[in-house]
Amino acid sequence: MSTLPPPMGLLAELTHRCPLQCPYCSNPLELKRASEELDTASWQRVFGEAARLGILQLHLSGGEPAARADLETLVASASAAGLYTNLITSGLMLDESRIRALAAAGLDHVQLSFQDVDATGADHVSGLKGSLARKLAFAGHVRDAGLALTVNAVVHRQNIARVPQIIALALALEAGRLEIAHVQYYGWAFANRDALLPARAEVDEATAIVTAAREQLKGRLVIDYVTPDWYGARPKPCMGGWGRQVMVVTPNGEVWPCHAASTIPGLIFDNVRAKPLAEIWQHNHAFNAFRGTQWMTEPCQGCEHAERDWGGCRCQALALTGNAAATDPVCELSPAHGALAEMARDAATASPPPFRYRRIGG
Ligand code: SF4
Ligand code: FES
């Protein structure tokens, strides 16, 4: 019997298929095809294992999770297993009858992503024409089905000026929560960073607007704000600390400590097709590689913040320094912090290059 506490959440990436092509997509560089995805019974078994392990929250994500025709069946199984179910969706593959069926199956919550509040901007970021109008209609269906709604908006240099309109949109849609998240620069977003990174002055202005709105809208709308790492002085505890709070199951059943873990060379992942979730949580090589503080080197080793930020983000450390075990360069104590600040300044002042879009299979 181990003393390792269970994770709080399971992020189930049901599929990498998606009608959108956001340039900051958090899915890995190599996308899985439909033929490689876990089948219905395997996902149902995984949800049962998750509940027995002590996991409370299931985040059904993708790609676009509604690209799976069995989404309603999966939600029903997860709900029957006692998991709180959160659907993270673009809203573009769910009509009114399907969202009603999901509510009847026990879905608890919908997180709807918006690429922009301006139709042209939304088309540009998503690589799809007419997405904004369809999302607005979908939000109405969510409300009519009695489901809790969170509006999610990823902000970057091409939409950051519209933060006030994003807040107004969340209010108009009667969302209970708004998540405004600056792009996190690893994986595909790292490839698009020069097109996405705002200038520090733009970030400061957006932060001031959000701070004022939070105060003004207390009791009406909760606003979560994910600040941009590259202008910070201390890193965020990515994933709540490696191997501490979250397990990610990929469309083909691999289990990762975070959604970009496959960028780190040398990690050995297990697959739910071969091993139970509980065994993977306890004993898997990748989960134990950066768990706790033992793996840390200076300046993290012995730092008073080590058990608060857990050294920041391993994937970002790798992307920026070539070493996943290095201190996240977002930290001002990192020897690479100065170079990161310079890179951010250069990227944000140059004219933005065109977005790089992608599809499964290139
Ligand atoms: Fe966090 Fe490491 Fe920086 Fe300390 S040195 S604040 S533990 S990232
Ligand atoms: Fe992998 Fe932060 S995204 S540790």
Image (cartoon, helix red, strand yellow):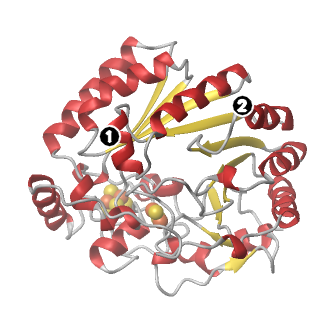
Q: How many marks?
A: 2
* Residue 50 visible within the image: yes
Q: Nearer the viewer, residue 252 or 354?
A: 354
The circle drawn on residue 85 is: none
Q: Nearer the viewer, residue 81 or 169?
A: 169
Above or below 126: residue 287: below
Dot 2 beta carbon under 8 Å from ligand 2: no
Q: In the rendered view, does 112 fall on the left or right side of 296?
A: right
Dot 1 beta carbon under 8 Å from ligand 2: no
Name the residue furthest bottom: 266
Q: In the rendered view, does 109 fall on the left or right side of 127?
A: right
> What type is the residue that disc 1 sits on?
Gly
Above or below 258: residue 321: below
Give the crowd class for mark 2: few <14, some 14-19, many >=20 residues within 10 Å: some
Spatial separation of the CA atoms under disc 2 and disc 1: 26 Å
Secondary structure of residue under mark 2 = helix
> What type is the residue that disc 2 sits on?
Glu
Q: Quadrant of residue 116?
A: top left
* Residue 8 visible within the image: no
Query: Residue 300: percent from the left, percent from the top?
Result: 35, 66
- Residue beneath disc 1: 121
The circle drawn on residue 96 is: 2
Query: Which residue is depicted at the point 46% across and 76% down?
Result: 263
Secondary structure of residue under mark 1 = helix
Query: Which residue is depicted at the point 59% across and 38% down?
Result: 111
Query: Residue 64: percent from the left, percent from the top?
Result: 61, 53
Query: Which residue is depicted at the point 62% across and 57% down?
Result: 246
